[in-house]
Image (cartoon, coloured by chain):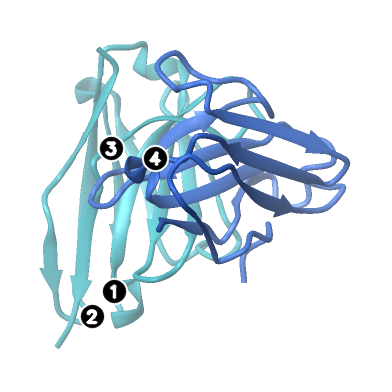
Chain colours: A cyan, B blue
Amino acid sequence: EVQLVQSGAEVKKPGESLKISCKASGYGFNNYWIAWVRHMPGKGLEWVGRIYPGDSRTTYSPSFQGQVTVSVDKSITTSYLQWTSLQASDTAMYYCARLYGGNSEAWFDPWGQGTLVTVSS
Amino acid sequence: QSVLTQPPSASGTPGQRVTISCSGRSSNIGRSSVFWYQRLPGTAPNVLIYRDNQRPSGVPDRFSGSKSGNSASLAISGLRSEDEGDYYCATWDDSLSGPVFGGGTTLTVL
């Protein structure tokens, strides 16, 4: 079974750093992009960035470029989303998802269960 | 402000047919496949329609997708209470070199 399992909820203070994870199983990890998607309360889904585990290529949404870092550890088939200095506006649910289909298709399947990040003083 | 435009809400009574629209541009819907995602309360999104009008195995044929020009639509017939949730369209945007989503439509079954 193809599965993405994310790390648990986090509560952080503004200015703190954070790294959340997404463990993949059940498919050729190196061969599919892994994407990260943000869902803020009451808002729509937003693509954050993606990584190709085979060669660690990354691309980011212009809205998130420089704000977060997407990385991967192929040895444990895990992708990460990282912040160096959190802000209250980073409070959201973050999903990882495999990008299935062609190189330029918005086909996210499957999705992880989501990691809730709360940033509050 | 999402790149793709969806109505914020839709509603219908059990058994009715509802349609959710998704409007974009030539750089996204006009040249790339559209996907629809269903997010039921408390769960992660799941693909409902892929490549404009294809249903994954397990998705009832009550759900159908279509696309024309720079717009797409999701139709749900025989509405059921368990269809309540959020629906998102998505496609690739060549200008942004990445996927883009609609703002989501919350479906209420009255």
Kind of residue at badge 1: Ser
Do discs 4 and 2 share a chain? no
Q: Residue at x 12, y 57 (%)?
A: A9
In terms of depth relative to the viewer, which is nearer, A60 or A116?
Answer: A116
Of tags 3 and 2, which is closer to the observer?
Answer: 3
- Counting residues from the start of the chain, the first of labels 3 and 2 encountered is 2
Q: Which residue is mark 2?
A: A15
Q: Give the secondary structure at mark 1.
A: loop
Residue B54 higher or lower than A104, as above or below: above
Q: Which residue is mark 1?
A: A85
In the picture, residue A12 is in which quadrant? bottom left
> Mark 1, chain letter?
A
Q: Which residue is mark 4?
A: B80
As drawn, the label of residue A112 is 3
- Residue B106 seen in the figure: yes
> Mark 2, chain letter?
A
Rate crowding at label 4 as few (under 14), some (14 to 19) or many (20 or more) other CA atoms within 10 Å: some
Kind of residue at badge 4: Arg
The answer to whether mark 2 and mark 1 are in CB contact below 8 A is yes
Kind of residue at badge 3: Gly
The quadrant of the image that shows the N terminus of chain A is: top left
The answer to whether mark 4 and mark 3 are in CB contact below 8 A is no
